[in-house]
Image: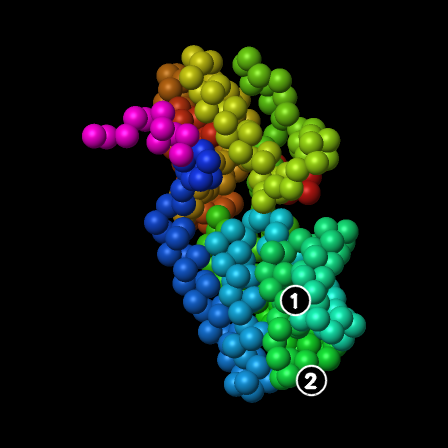
């Protein structure tokens, strides 16, 4: 007897099963990145510390690799979160190991205090808890390092995996690490039929007001809201974008289909639907190339008008 849809829906809700999922190519990109990251960090730790230390100190970096290569735009994976979270947690872990003789209490204090410090210093990075705990339960080999544990291997490995994240994600135009390297991502303000205008400042204020911790930056939430509004507005018969020379437009597609184009010229014709537009590809497949198409084709492709990051 099949389970009723309402029961399945409630079960998914309570399990936290997401309705959306990453596409196959994105999963493969993340998996290969994680593989390369851990192989390189493992060998670096072997060279720095030797085989007796490596399994202990690399374990928390495995979780970091998952975050940096699977969700590179998350606030939890940005460089300050990765390096700051690990180093601060390592220092606290060593201090607790030296000050508290009871291992269970020292381990609990290390994780709790590391969590508090990461919150206070705005560098929340979940694997930092494992780094703090390893300083307590890592045994005599880790204890012998003392506070040097926070520098070598923790800080060195943190910086290494950040550098790998920058280089690896740069090969894929729709992925940039850190998020500050993401170009041309902010949609321009435009009226959307039936909906009030949402700004990034309003999103940040709402997050602060609700006192919630989100695994997404205000910039990412802004793009999600804009894409949602654009989809809603697309159901109306009026166009949502007015093309103009010099305008920058994006197709809001995920993964390798993501593209950004700038309108550089236009050719009018007696029949408006056969007007031609000339555009330069700024990001995505064919980057740097100039091409042309009919105006109605360009409007069907464009999902939003955008501005380069950092321009008010």
User: Which quarter shows the C terminus?
Assistant: top right
Residue 195 x, y percent position in the rendering: 57, 16
Disc assigned to residue 104: 1
Asked whether residue 134 is drawn in magenta, I would say no
Q: In the shown orientation, is residue 201 left or right of residue 9?
A: right
The residue drawn where x is 61% and y is 41% is 214
Residue 152 x, y percent position in the rendering: 67, 78
Quarter of the rendering containing residue 1: top left
Marks counted in the figure total 2
Quarter of the rendering containing residue 100: bottom right
Disc assigned to residue 144: 2
Residue 238 x, y percent position in the rendering: 47, 13
Q: Secondary structure at mark 2?
A: loop
Q: In the shown orientation, is residue 222 left or right of residue 289?
A: right
Q: Nearer the viewer, residue 2 or 254?
A: 2
The residue drawn where x is 49% and y is 59% is 66
Residue 49 x, y percent position in the rendering: 60, 85
The residue drawn where x is 40% and y is 34% is 11
Regarding residue 11, the answer to whether it shows in the image is: yes
Disc assigned to residue 126: none
Query: Does residue 228 lie above or below 40 as drawn?
Result: above
- The chief SS type of the magenta part is helix
Residues rendered magenta in the picture: 1-11
Regarding residue 306, the answer to whether it shows in the image is: no
In the current view of this chain or complex, which residue is farthest to the left?
1
Frontmost of labels 2 and 1 is 1
């Amino acid at each position: 007897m099949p389970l009723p849809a309402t029961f399945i829906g409630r079960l998914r809700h309570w399990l936290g099963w997401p309705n959306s999922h990453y596409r196959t190519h994105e999963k493969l990109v993340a998996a290969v990145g994680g593989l390369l990251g851990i192989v390189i960090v493992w060998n670096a730790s072997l060279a720095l510390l030797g085989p007796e230390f490596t399994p202990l100190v690399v374990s928390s970096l495995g979780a970091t690799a998952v975050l940096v290569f699977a969700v590179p735009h998350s606030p939890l994976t940005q460089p300050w979160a990765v390096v700051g979270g690990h180093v601060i947690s390592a220092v606290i872990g060593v201090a607790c190991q030296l000050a508290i003789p009871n291992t269970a209490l020292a381990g609990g204090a290390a994780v709790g205090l590391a969590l508090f410090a990461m919150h206070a210093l705005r560098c929340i990075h979940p694997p930092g808890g494992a780094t703090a705990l390893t300083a307590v339960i890592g045994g005599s080999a880790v204890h012998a390092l003392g506070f040097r544990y926070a520098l070598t291997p923790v800080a060195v490995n943190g910086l290494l995996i950040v550098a790998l994240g920058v280089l690896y994600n740069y090969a894929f135009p729709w992925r940039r690490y850190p998020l500050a390297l993401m170009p041309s991502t902010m949609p321009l303000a435009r009226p959307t039929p039936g909906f009030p205008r949402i700004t990034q400042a309003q999103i940040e204020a709402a997050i602060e007001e609700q006192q919630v911790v989100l695994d997404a930056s205000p910039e990412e939430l802004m793009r999600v809201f804009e894409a949602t509004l654009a989809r809603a507005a697309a159901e109306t018969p009026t166009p949502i974008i007015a093309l103009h020379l010099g305008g920058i437009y994006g197709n809001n597609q995920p993964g390798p289909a993501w593209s950004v184009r700038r309108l550089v010229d236009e050719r009018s014709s007696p029949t408006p639907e056969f007007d031609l537009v000339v555009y330069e590809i700024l990001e995505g497949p064919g980057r740097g190339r100039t091409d042309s198409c009919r105006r109605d084709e360009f409007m069907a492709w464009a999902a939003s008008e955008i501005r380069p990051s950092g321009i008010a």
